[in-house]
Amino acid sequence: LSHLQEAKVELINNHLLLDEHTKRNLELTETLRLREKTYSLLWLLDKCKTAMGSRYLKSSILNPLTNKDEIERRYDFVSKLSTEFILRDDLIKCLEEVYDLERLVGRITYGNLNAKDLLQLKSSVKELPRIKEILTELKFDKKIDTFEEIYSLLDRTILEDAPFTLHEGHLIKEGYNAELDELKKISSGSKDFILEM
């Protein structure tokens, strides 16, 4: 169960409690008649650039805050993003390059990731320093890790044109591991290796 994160206690009085009938009748995430996302409140508001953002928005709609300070804090950031439009556009461009990190981390934890996942992780982590820089300029009060060591490792090791599955090989860059380079050389030039013996 190593993939499970530590359970977090959510205080009931931090959120407005909505029963299932209320959620359906207000058409928060799906319409009443067709039970589709289209034309629901979530459909109207969701302009998120990442799957993680869309999930967070859905959770926020289904669990509205009741804490006045936290609501005002959110309003302050929304207000700042509407006035700091250059930083906002830069942030949007960065977020367009970020893949679904929650899904990728899940695949890594389960051990069923492929080369495409590693390249998506590399592309996403590459954007984190710039995202952190923009959020610092906006005086965002949450800590953002940039994972530079992970990016450096992926950049040094994974080929850009790696095949979809790990079983096909051709995943690790030449020069990363001398023993692996030697084995690749032997497998590709097996006739020459036999002649040398």
Image: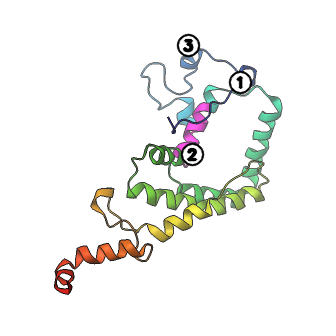
- Residue identified by numbered label 3: 21
Image x and y of residue 30, in percent: 49, 26
**Marked residue nearer the N-terminal end (3 or 2):** 3
Mark 2: secondary structure:
loop
Tell me the mark number nearer the camera, choosing from 1 and 2: 1
Is 84 placed left or right of 55 in the picture? right
Q: CA distance from mark 3 to mark 2?
A: 27 Å
Q: Residue at x 54, y 57 (%)?
A: 124
Mark 3: secondary structure:
helix
| The magenta segment | 45-59
Image x and y of residue 53, in percent: 58, 43
**Marked residue nearer the N-terminal end (1 or 2):** 1
* Quarter residue 128 falls in: bottom right
Task: Examine the rendered structure and indicate whether residue 132 appears above or below residue 65.
Answer: below
Q: Residue furthest right?
A: 69
Amino acid type of the residue tagged 3 in the rendering: His
Mark 1: secondary structure:
loop
Q: Residue at x 36, y 75 (%)?
A: 181
Is 167 placed left or right of 27 in the picture? left
Amino acid type of the residue tagged 1 in the rendering: His
